[in-house]
Image (cartoon, rainbow, N blue to C red):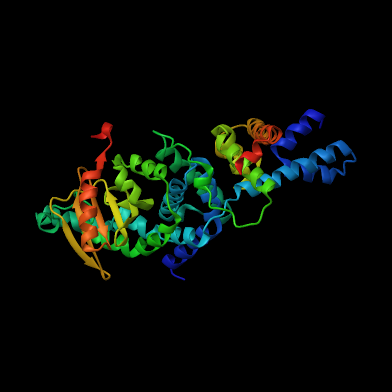
Amino acid sequence: MSNDAEKQFRFEALAREYGMDLYRYALWICGNDALAKDLVQETYIRAWKALDSLKDAKAAKSWLITILRREYARTFERKVPKFTNVEDVVVEDTEELSPEERAERDLLRRGMMKLPPRYREPLLLQVVAGYSCEEIATELKLSKGAVMTQLFRAREKLKSTLQDDGITGNIHELF
Amino acid sequence: MNSSEFEKALGAEPRETAARLEREASPDPARRAAVDEALAFEQRLENALRVPVDEEALVESLLAAPKQAHRRFGPPHWLALAASVFILAGVSGLLWVSVQPAGSPSVADYVANHYEHDGAAVLARAGEGTTRDEVQAILTRLGAQASETLVSQIRFIKFCPTPDSRGAHMVLATQDGPATVIFMPAVQVDEPLLLRFDGVSAQVVGLERGAAAIIGASDSAAEDLMTRLQEGVKPLAADA
């Protein structure tokens, strides 16, 4: 296989294997479908250019996430886009859910969008990207203890969102 | 691990903590109940964050990255050197006409290549619809604003690479069906360009700042769009 063909093959594998996770990560970070797609596309353009520097295939995901985070910081360093309504961002689920399950899922999504970035980002790295606490600490340049605290608080905030809305009956106002 | 440490570990790493408890074969029923509850919440959280995505369209757009990288970052180094020789020889003026900033590919080539690459795929996504907020957010990031009339015609919008800057690729509803418009903030054209490629016709028109390519519209719709774009797309007040 020629070098060009091999590079193309490696790149396609990266796109197919990690594209969805990167898009979801970008979507929950920036809260806007069009911007998330643009962000992921920019990430892959830069990945293509720097593909030769990726020596360890096992590090591909964290390599792409790092590129995406840098691109996000660079793109949005002047202005953070306002989150759109979650219903405008998320494609309608096709899976069949009960009204209660759907309402709870919507509340979780809204809660996620309301989380401050310092809580949201480590949680996304863990839940969407599958990072361990150590990996999150490395990526965010934090101590493992700080990461664990942020993850704990992020989940507590999401749980309290569910409890508050559930207890007061707001969950049913979604219908 | 005391209760406080266990609670924190479970909230921070539910799956790892559950696995640890399993390995330790802890008989503590309270901890087991807490783990079950945490894992149930984790499953709901994962389901909520796993938003549906059109995987095929996404991957297809990512696979286009090499082509975009090539366009974005220009021709290979040896070509740049060759171009420099031409420039030194004083022939660059013959090669680069006034329709684009120095160093860019020709606007006509860009429009044709971009539409060939992405036009049909973007047209197909017009059915997804878009919101005014989304349109305004993208235009604002490009330093532009559009009239309400124009915004109401936009059925889909996305960022796209354009000569020397990022631009917007849009699908607009017209009286004769959908038409594609590519907004190129950094391109200047003095006179409208008429293009024909792949069986479609296109017009590139200058705006107050930047230019727009109208592709695949009927003659009357193109004329109407041209007027609306020229009158309706303005630089943001701070950028004016």
- From the viewer's perspective, is B172 left or right of B39? left
Q: Is residue A54 above or below residue A104?
A: below
Nearest the eye: B238 or A129: B238
Q: Quadrant of the C terminus of chain B?
A: top left
Q: Give the residue at x 50% y 44%.
A: A66
- The picture quadrant where one finds residue A93 is bottom right
Q: Quadrant of the N terminus of chain B?
A: top right
Q: Position of residue B237 (x, y in %)?
A: 26, 33
Q: Is residue B77 above or below residue B32?
A: below
Can residue B150 be seen at all in this image of the molecule?
Answer: yes
Q: Give the residue at x 45% y 53%.
A: A44
Q: Give the residue at x 48% y 65%.
A: A9
- From the viewer's perspective, is B32 left or right of B140? right
Nearest the eye: A59 or B48: B48
Please count the marks in the image. Answer: 0
Q: Give the residue at x 26% y 51%.
A: B163
- The picture quadrant where one finds residue A7 is bottom left
Q: Position of residue B72 (x, y in %)?
A: 32, 53
Q: Position of residue B113 (x, y in %)?
A: 29, 62
Nearest the eye: B87 or B160: B160
Can residue A131 be seen at all in this image of the molecule?
Answer: no
